[in-house]
Image: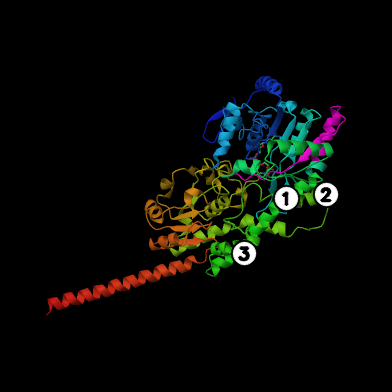
Amino acid sequence: MAEYSYSPTGEGFPLPSQEDYSKEFGRLEEVVNRQRNLNREIVVVMGLGFVGAVMAAVVADAQDGKGNPIKFVIGMQRPSPRSFWKIPLINRGLSPISTEDPEVALMIDRCVKEKRTLAATFTYDALKFADVVIIDVQCDYLKESLGNVTNGQAEMKALEESFEIVASHISPNTLVLIETTVAPGTTEQIAYPIMRKVFRKRGINTDPLLAHSFERVMPGKNYVASIRDFWRVCSGVNEEATRRVVKFLNEVINTKEFPLTVLDRPIESETAKIVENSFRATILAFLDEWSIFAEQNGVDLIKVINAIKVRPTHSNIIFPGPGIGGYCLPKDGGLGVWAYRHIHGFEDDIFKITTAAIDINDTRSLHVAQLTRDALRNMGRPIASAEILVLGASYREDVGDTRYSGSELIVRRLTEMGTEIRVHDPYVLHWWEFEKQDEYPTSSHSLKRFFRGQERLKDLRVEQNLETGLQGVDAVILAVRHKQYLNLDPDEVVKNSGGPIAVIDCFGILDDERIRRYFELGCEVKGLGRGHVKRIKDHVQEARERMLLKMSGEAVRGAETEFRKANP
Ligand SMILES: NC(=O)c1ccc[n+]([C@@H]2O[C@H](COP(=O)([O-])OP(=O)(O)OC[C@H]3O[C@@H](n4cnc5c(N)ncnc54)[C@H](O)[C@@H]3O)[C@@H](O)[C@H]2O)c1
């Protein structure tokens, strides 16, 4: 029986059978011949994930000075049950990614249906047609413990296989551009020797034309612009590879306004990516201790950050939210640490800050469970039987990417503490980290293994209706700054939940007015880095006491008047 791959909306697509491969190759051959006659270069993008799917569209949309398309792009995705559905979707002109940037869907639709410069396939044979191959497959870093990044390893197997597959299909003149974030040294010391060996076996005596240029894509409101209209760094293994990668990027990306930086060797481009992301992870981790300081000393860290940010030299100080998720920041430093020992052979332990930052970021969200416990305790409700709604499953605002999101650990810890969890996210239909927790990201690497009592989380489904999600909850955790959560009206929230609740703000979402209103409605509020809520609570309490005093004074005076009237 055919195995199926299901899209997020539940449409099932049968995985290709053996005979589908030869048919698919025939289909591609015809299309490619037509495209070559139009003088278009054939570009194969390997891996149609968050990066590859949109990069493929950006390249397919590229045109010359006269407005004519210059590339034909074949997006190539392996036909796994988890990802195959992306291929038929793209071939219908539909985006496989749910995002706030309308340009993603428009561009894919335009390139597939109007310009006819984009198609997707499952066969590696597509590589045979390529003038350029862009590698956008993942390179995971598998951690063996929670909060200790040094105890982990780069998952090189899939990437090494990809290099071998590419080398055994491409023509000698094909430019191979690695965009995957890799352990520094990978292009020259892993990809190059693997591909050269395959070339020699095929009787090809030239060297592979390999280059590295990392992606700085930010899935979100400016998804497309973060690929096309942004600065790039690149480097090739030799002069010809460098010349080709520079030419290619100049053709497909807005390098006029965002000039390229060309580095001498791929290890420099690879290191640039790792340092860039480790820097970001570090400035975020640094605020974790100040966030605790703020909570314990009546300080609102959000206001402190905004006060500091006005200094141009400090404008990139940023509040860390409930931990730092996403695919990149939790792992990229680890790739560097791993490379130092396992690619370059050093024994000493030079990494202190990079590793500490990742460990802090990886465990920060656990504190949210403590705040929730304390808020419920203040309301006289035990956490163990509480119903809690988590608002936001993804790792950042306005996208549907749940990889390593802080929300996952919040859910896991609170489940361990006995709570019933509900989750709402307008961008996420399936939270695979739970639904497929026995096989995803790999069978042995779900974060599930660090917590007890996680079995029932397989049945966790993402609620799409906020009102329904709120009904009867004891606590709401504002975990992600999705635009749908920024202006929630406290009166509505409390009305929909059926009474006072605990509200936990993980991301500086609530302004003081809303915090005050929640207290007035009998709720309890706590927040990461938001020590000043206690002050607001005290003010509301004092105002309430004053009012009660006034009311009881009036009541006494009223009773006296009545008494005098009755006893003149
Ligand atoms: N997501 C981001 O925001 C971001 C930003 C900058 C850089 N990056 C880097 O870009 C790379 C890709 O990230 P992503 O977020 O797109 O990952 P992803 O997991 O969304 O996509 C990878 C895709 O490659 C496919 N794939 C894996 N092996 C394959 C093979 N042999 N042949 C064909 N397809 C294959 C997978 O099925 C998947 O669809 C990573 O190195 C990542 O670190 C990601």
Residue type marked 1: Ile
Which amino acid type corresponds to the residue marked 2 in the rendered image?
His
Q: Is residue 137 visible?
A: yes
Is the shortest distance between ligand 1 and the CB of mark 3 under 8 Å?
Answer: no
- Dot 3 corresponds to which residue? 289
Which corner quadrant of the image does residue 52 belong to?
A: top right
Considering the numbered disc 2 on the image, is that residue within a helix, a strand or a loop? loop
> Can you say whether 379 is above or below 165 in the image?
below
**Residue pointed to by mark 2:** 344
Quarter of the image containing the N terminus? top right
Look at mark 1 in the image and give the residue it sits on.
Answer: 274
> Which comes before the other along the chain, label 3 or label 1?
1
| Cα–Cα span, label 2 and label 1 | 16 Å
Other residues around mark 2 within 10 Å, as few (<14) / some (14–19) / many (≥20): few
Q: Tell me the crowding category of disc 1: few under 14, some 14 to 19, or many 20 or more residues within 10 angstroms, Cα based.
A: many
Q: Earlier in the sequence, mark 2 or mark 3?
A: 3
Residue at the image position 64 percent from the left and 44 percent from the top: 217
Q: Is residue 307 above or below residue 149?
A: below
Earlier residue among tags 2 and 1: 1
Classify 72 as above or below 428: above
